[in-house]
Amino acid sequence: MPNLTLTRRQNALALFQAFAEQALAAGTPPKGLEQAFAATLQVSPSMWSQIKSSRPIGDKLARQIEQLSGKAQGWLDEARADTSPTPAELAFLALSLKAWRATNAAGRKALREQMKALANANP
């Protein structure tokens, strides 16, 4: 059974990520996004900071966060697959981009073919 405290924290962080991405796309400067998100949840910036790091989200606060975020009741309690890249995946992507940019068309074709062969060998 998934850990409810961890699930709620991960989902709250996912809500913040979506909030931040939307705000940044709209041209909002990054400074102050944490405080703005805390305000939308009607909690203090200090409380949001505690939630992010270690404070458990109780039932009352979970329902408050869901309601103010436009999510259905119980949304915060549902485990979701983590789709964000891991640090190792990000390092691989950075290395791949560096290799791609450092070569010519023939090298890019060879890289693409190697990747396709690896992907097809491990479906």
Image: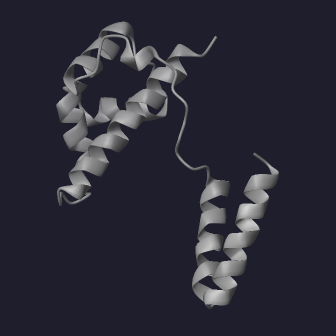
In the displayed structure, would residue 51 be above or below residue 93?
above
Instruction: Say whether residue 16 is left or right of residue 105.
Output: left
**Residue 75 spot, x, y in % from top left:** 37, 17
The picture places residue 29, in percent across and down from the top left corner, at 21, 60
Rendered view: 93 above or below 106: above
Q: Is residue 54 above or below residue 76?
A: below
Residue at 57% across / 50% down in the picture?
A: 85
Q: In the image as oriented, which residue stretches furthest toward the bottom?
A: 104
Residue 32 seen anywhere in this rendered image of the structure: no
- The quadrant holding residue 18 is top left
Residue 62 location (% of width, % of height): 34, 15
- Residue at x-position 30% and y-position 50%: 21
> Can residue 120 be spotted in the picture?
yes
Q: Residue at x 78, y 59 (%)?
A: 118
Q: Which of the pair 72/118 is nearer the observer?
A: 118
Q: Does residue 53 lie above or below 33 as drawn? A: above
What's the image's color scheme?
one colour
| Quadrant of image for the C terminus | top right
In the picture, measured across the screen, residue 120 lies left or right of residue 88, that is right
Residue 33 versus residue 93: which sits nearer the camera?
93
| Residue at x 53% of width, y 41% of height | 83
Most foreground residue, 70 or 108: 108
Residue found farthest to the right? 121
In percent of width and height, residue 55 lies at 44, 24
Quadrant placement of the N terminus: top right
Q: How many marks?
A: 0
